[in-house]
Amino acid sequence: MTAPRNHGGGLDAAIARFGGTRANWLDLSTGINPVPYPVGEVANEAWTALPDTGAMDRMLSAARRFWNVPEGAKIIAAPGASALIARMPELVAAPDVHIPGPTYNEHEAAFRHAGKRSDEASPVRVLVHPNNPDGRLWYRAEVMDGHKALTIIDESFCDVVPDRSHVAKTATPGIVVLKSFGKFWGLAGLRLGFAIGTPKTLSNLAESLGPWPVSGPALEIGARALEDTAWAQTTRTRLTQDATKLDALMTTAGGQPLGGTTLFRLYKTENAQTWQTRLAEHRIWSRTFPYSRIWLRLGLPAPDRWDQLETALNGTAGGARLPEATSVGPAAK
């Protein structure tokens, strides 16, 4: 059996270890917008009928406008970005891949499962932009100068900085941009993602996804959300304010901001496992990483849950104050 990969989430395991119920836990281990797009009513037919071409066309048209997809590029919808990540190795015959890390581990897992080895000289690259967990942004020159056979750019968190997107490059053969709907719009359970690239580059992808890759409700809600540009702009402003607030709270508590996005923040701590345990005692779940003993990542609380985080960081309710960060050099790698 394959060992489970390290991810955010996993709240059931945290509850089993520390107690409590899902209702009193604050899950900050993911980078999902805590104020999701308002779904509203969904037509009954979206639930009962097979998804038709009209619904898909509407959503893809909305996506093309929202992300300014160039004329020469095609856009494909899928049941989540993870489903697309798992299929990326099918796009090339090269025996290897270069995935600069540390980064989101599903990319490496997908290529490893396909029998591909890691090689910095590979003509196939995967760039996570902004990177998870440190928020690194890849410049356009870096993307194009290193482009050979296939460059996959995972923009799951890029909707908070739309001006930095590389979608404009997707008319170039071998450039593929992946988009996630669940993060920015806060509807991860809807399972909706997109791949953007030239028709030739994505030629086999649509076939491998099957005739009805996206559910009727996801098509309707996705189209509605992608058409609502006012909501997107208001959300970006709120996320920026909340990320600034989170940095201030963590700095006061002894954490040192290292980067991230406005959907998640990365901090240097003295000991990330200690921080995670102390926060868990206050029913707050955070994200640590197997490759760093000092990195701690936090998502944003919902508007009515900031008090719970502030209480935990202040060390009240019977808990000891969290340890301050210290410089420990290369252990972060």
Image: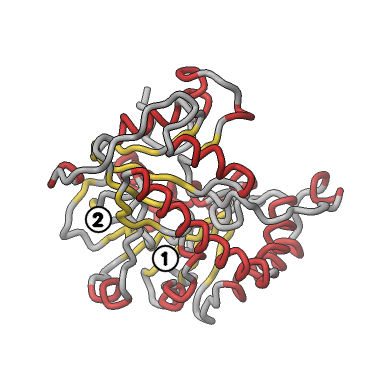
Q: Earlier in the sequence, mark 2 or mark 1?
A: 2
Q: Nearer the viewer, residue 221 or 151?
A: 221
**Numbered label tally:** 2
Q: Which label sits on residue 94?
A: none
Other-residue count near label 2 (Cα within 10 Å), few / some / many at <14 / 14–19 / ≥20: some
The part of the image, by quadrant, that contains residue 280 is: top left
Q: Nearer the viewer, residue 30 or 237?
A: 237
The percent coordinates of residue 329 (x first, y second) are 13, 46
Q: Which residue is mark 1?
A: 176
Query: Which residue sits at x=34%, y=66%?
Result: 137
In the rendered view of the protein, which quadrant contains the N terminus? top left
The percent coordinates of residue 49 (x first, y second) are 81, 48
- Left/right placement of residue 174 relative to residue 190 reads left
Are dots 2 and 1 in contact, CB under 8 Å?
Answer: no
SS under mark 1: strand
Q: Nearer the viewer, mark 2 or mark 1?
A: 2
Q: Which residue is mark 2?
A: 100
Mark 2 → mark 1, Cα distance in angstroms: 16 Å
SS under mark 2: loop
Q: Nearer the viewer, residue 168 or 183?
A: 183
Height in image: 112 above or below 2?
A: below
For badge 1, the amino acid type reads: Val
Query: Which residue sits at x=32%, y=58%?
Result: 126
The percent coordinates of residue 317 (x first, y second) are 49, 27
Height in image: 248 above or below 305?
A: below
Other-residue count near label 1 (Cα within 10 Å), few / some / many at <14 / 14–19 / ≥20: many
The percent coordinates of residue 240 (x first, y second) are 50, 63
For badge 2, the amino acid type reads: Pro
Height in image: 228 above or below 39?
A: below
Question: Can residue 89 be spotted in the picture?
Answer: no
Residue furthest bottom in the image: 71
